[in-house]
Amino acid sequence: MERKKYIFALIVLIAMLCGCTVDKQCRVSYKVEMWALFQGDSLAADTTIAYYQRYDSITVQGVGNDSILYDNVKSVGTLVLQLRPDTTLTAYSLIYHGQTDTLYIRHNNTIRFVSLACGQMVLYTIEEVWSGSGWIDSVAILDPTLEVKGKDNIRIIAHE
């Protein structure tokens, strides 16, 4: 009887170690994203406080692919975007009320080994950001290091 309990416990342990939960947990826990905050092109009455803007009807699509990340979304104040691990330049097309602009992000990619269960992940450092000649006035880097937990990495200043 004691041997059956031991074998059962060993089977349960192996099942837990080999299950899909670790893979799902790794993908969620080690997801690296870039956060882009919108700011209006004017300051509030107190000039030390920036005026943060929310935009309606924003569509965001990756340049060079068909994936639409935001499809006519209302009240957008922050975009959460992925950078490409296979190159050092990522571009997104941003459409606002029929006007299109392109957001360009030049970045360094660093591969970091996490664990045997999770494998590796790519960490990013933003080197430069700029936009095309559309509705975006300027883009600034707030925090160039993309980490696992989201924080504002770039600021997009646009026409109001």
Image (cartoon, rainbow, N blue to C red):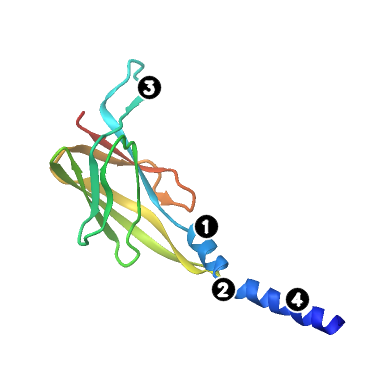
What residue type is disc 4 on?
Ala
| First in residue order: circle 4 vs circle 2 | 4
| Sooner in the amino-acid sequence: mark 3 or mark 2 | 3
Q: Quadrant of residue 3?
A: bottom right
Image quadrant in which you'd find residue 50: top left
Q: Position of residue 80 (x, y in %)?
A: 36, 47
Identify the amino acid type marked 2. Answer: Leu
Q: Secondary structure at mark 2?
A: loop
Mark closer to the chain start, 2 or 1: 1
Q: Which residue is mark 3?
A: 48
- Closer to the camera, 24 or 50? 24
The answer for how far apart the CA atoms under marks 4 and 1 are is: 28 Å
Q: CA distance from mark 3 to mark 2?
A: 48 Å
User: What whole-number distance in Å separates the C-alpha atoms at marks 4 and 3?
Assistant: 62 Å
Q: Which mark is residue 29?
A: 1
The mark closer to the camera, 4 or 2, is 4
10 Å neighbourhood of mark 4: few (<14), some, or many (≥20)?
A: few
SS at mark 3 in the image: loop
Location of residue 1 with respect to 19 vertically, above or below: below
